[in-house]
Amino acid sequence: MINLENEIKAYSIKNALEHGKADPSKVLPKLFNHGLESSEIKTIMPLVAKAIKEINSLSKNKLEELYKSFSQYIPEKEEKPRALPELPNPSSKMVFRLAPFPSGALHIGNAKTYLLNALYAEKYNGKILLVMDDTIGSEMKQIMPEAYSLIEEAFQWLGVNYSKPVIYKSDRLKIYYEYAQELIKKDNAYVCHCPQEKLKEHREKGIECGCRQFPVKEQKKRWKQMFEAKEGSAVLRIKTSMMHPNPAFRDRVLFKISDRPHPKVGNKYRVWPALEMSWAIDDHLLGITHILRGSDLQIETDMEKYLWDIFSWKYPETVHVGLVKLEGAEGKLAKSKSQQEVKAGTYTGWDDPRTWSIQSLKRRGIKAESIRSFVFEIGLNKQNISIPIDALYSINRKLIDKETNRYSFVENPIELQIKNKPESKIVEVPIHPDKKETRAIEANRIFISKSDFEKFKGKEIRLLHLYNVKLDKNIKNNIGEAKFTSLDNKDISKINWVSEFIPCTILMPSGEKINGIGENSIKTLKYEEIVQFERFAFCKLDRKIGEEYEFWFTHR
């Protein structure tokens, strides 16, 4: 632990020396590269936060002195590339499946498990099927017609090479009916007309339903009648032991009636299978060899195994992966919530940043390679884990940093009146710390953020790339006063500024819009170009509205 703490401190000092201030989202990936496991992040983050708080309180001279002692803790060689853990019983002909329910766009949370399937298919040179799990769903979780294309679009952008054509469960209802009849014939299923309250009471007490006692011949008739019965009046149940230790497993529903129109097949079908019924059949018929699914679907897996035993079918290898909670991702990652907000018009669409959909991440400037690497780093986690969203941002930052030029943006600006300032100062601003090219900016009027003025009032600060000034303590008529002090690049706080400007807004993941001004050279940017607003964040130019340029926040 002592060596780890020293390594964290070493990377924090190095980061502070390189960027003026240590950033946990930049220190964390360094630890990943040298053996940190994703499951350890929650334990490590307090150590990182503690080290960074200490480092950021020190002067540059002190940091340089400390680095001489701590640089020895930075490993000289990178670890060998990590590999995905082996799956049980690999073979030369492995078949995986993606099973999205089309109730909306994929978000970063549920895309994780699908992408993990794709990564394993690549690892074993296996086949991957895209099966739209479009049974009727519930009243609260309905199919959205646009979700079909949104899901395919997301997989294609992420580089998931699934086999064509796409398979739709809504086209396979007659197959499920055939196997339902087989279950009835084998006396393993029955039609039940009992209300939900009665069933719940029977399950809790371990009492068999009276509907279960009818002979097979009668059950066949009741099954046929189900197709004409009133919605909610009948279901087909599997026969299990009513003494099963899990009451939820006892006589589960296999089919239900719904009169809700289906976006793809309309009112062609009224009797719809439950998830475990349709998948028990399809996993066998489609030749699925390995199932990677969330740990929240354990009871569904148990029911599928129960059905496979009835038909004497071989089990596919099933691996349950833990759920991943993204700390720092504002809002709830849920398609049901996003569906409600999109329908209500609260969200602008499925690419609204608050959905955390793959489309919204793409629009913000997150690369497909970053999401793939993020899922790869998490790997086959068996336990539920929490990971800071900064882990994804850190991976993306590595990909975009070198190609991203720097610009100046000031939030909530005020003009700065500077006494005794150099006249008509033209400054050559580097477009990137690692590039020789510069951009000439004429510093006539100077604007800084009101928050910076309030933070540093009465103190000497450096206008980044320009000169030093001492801020007054008051703002009058939205003008802050200051006095020129020197051109020397002292070891003092630096703040951003803008001279000739254009109005800009930045749309944040929370849906909030930050208003400000950006330097005039922003006009030369191409749409969808990513920039780094110095000392603020990476942002992607999304569109121009009148004279205003709208950017989407990518990450810090």
Image: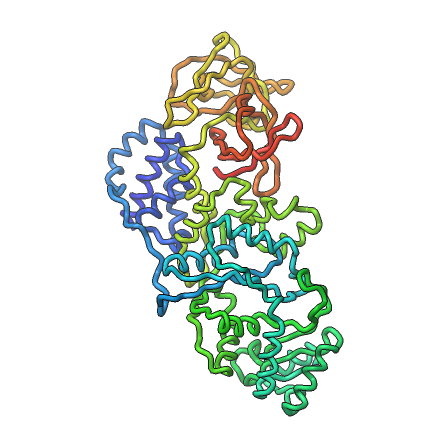
Q: Quadrant of residue 451?
A: top right
Above or below for 530 versus 158: above
Above or below for 164 versus 257: above
Q: Nearer the viewer, residue 197 or 436?
A: 436
* Image-based side of 556 in relation to 48, left or right: right
Q: Nearer the viewer, residue 151 or 353?
A: 151
Q: Quadrant of residue 119?
A: bottom left
Q: Nearer the viewer, residue 93 or 528?
A: 93
The residue lying at 43 percent from left, 67 percent from top is 290
- Provide residue 191's location: percent of width, then percent of height: 66, 83
Whether residue 81 is visible here, answered yes or no, is: yes
The residue lying at 48 percent from left, 65 percent from top is 295
Whether residue 461 is visible here, answered yes or no, is: no
The residue lying at 65 percent from left, 60 percent from top is 143
- Provide residue 44's location: percent of width, then percent of height: 38, 50
Q: Nearer the viewer, residue 518 or 313?
A: 313
- Provide residue 457's location: percent of width, then percent of height: 52, 22
The residue lying at 60 percent from left, 20 percent from top is 475
